Image (tube, rainbow, N blue to C red):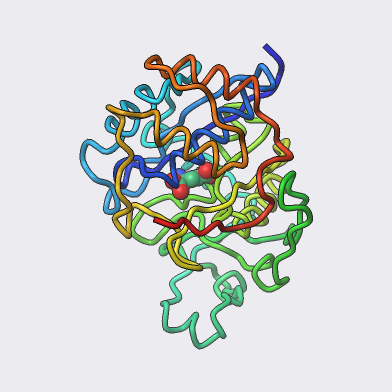
Amino acid sequence: MSSYTGRFAPSPSGSLHFGSLVAALGSYLRARSQQGKWLVRIEDIDPPREIPGAADDILRTLEQFGLHWDGDILYQSNRLEAYQQQIDNLLADDQAYFCQCTRKQIKEMGGTYDGRCGRLEPPLSSGAIRIRNQSAIASFDDILMGKVTTSTDFAAEDFILKRSDGLYAYQLAVVLDDAFQGITEVVRGADLLEATVRQLSLYQQFGLAEPQWLHLPLASLEPGFKLSKQNHATPVDGNQPQPALQAALTFLGQPQVEWYQDIRLMLEQAVAQFELHRIPGQREILLTN
Ligand code: GLU
């Protein structure tokens, strides 16, 4: 095995649909074609958005597609202490602060939080917790998409690490867990392209080694509307995985593979044929159905 470690990190908010299959397959092919490890992490830190049974359903579907992961599954719900520890350290170092601003107030600020609670003396002792964003990274190089740049306002915002309802923010959890799991390259959908600058700011501020980034095109039915669990994208059929696997390969610009009853043989061929430069470097591909 090489030192490459990749991952697929679904949120259990519904079944695996074609868009999430593309992300799973893309990250799997990339990892296996480099003789790397491929890990699966269940991002279950937002209970109100989760559907009971969805995590097991996703894992079963991955298995039906022959997408076997290395090691144990990491559940973010088992990592809450680590997230809190990081927050406590940041608060103690004055690198994070409490904020009680409402959505309405932030709208009045022009939509970007202006850091006002971070200047209060004495500081607040309850509310949401925001990073005192000292890195404000606004651009990075994506292996597929090239140089990505966001607005400086977005990059410099003191964004939320823990919500006032006590839930940890995705940005915090994803960075701590990718670092914890030794992920060397993050392969995921292009909907998270902009979020990457915030994650990079956290890597820098926490003193963690950054992974490489590779964002895949999103599968959309209409421009700007990716297939998602929220818009009830049809689940892929794990009992008959061959057609969806071929479609996902085509979506990723890869050649078709021979049809086998044993899906693992199809995946083996897909790994052997995988060529990164064939994946279209565009954010979105419209599906015609
Ligand atoms: N859990 C996120 C999702 O399902 C993906 C996070 C990531 O890959 O960084 O959209």
Q: Is 7 located above or below residue 272 in the figure? A: below
- Which image quadrant for residue 16? top left
Residue 143 is left or right of residue 234, and the answer is right
Note whether 163 is above or below 23 in the view shown.
below
| Residue 197, position as x, y percentages in the image | 67, 56
Name the spot of residue 70 as percent of width and height, x first: 50, 17
Residue located 60% across and 39% down the image: 187
Position above or below: 156 against 233: below
For the C terminus, the quadrant is bottom left
Tell whether 6 sits left or right of 108.
right
Nearer the observer, 158 or 55: 55
Q: Quadrant of residue 26?
A: top right
Please name whichever residue, 54 or 204, is drawn nearer the observer in this view of the structure: 54
Task: Residue 262: give x, y in percent of width and height.
Answer: 40, 14
Q: Residue at x 42, y 17 (%)?
A: 260
Please provide percent x and percent y for residue 233: 33, 53
Q: Is residue 115 shown left or right of residue 50?
A: right
Please say whether residue 67 is visible from this viewpoint.
yes
Q: Residue furthest top?
A: 1
Q: How many marks?
A: 0
Q: Is residue 88 visible?
A: no
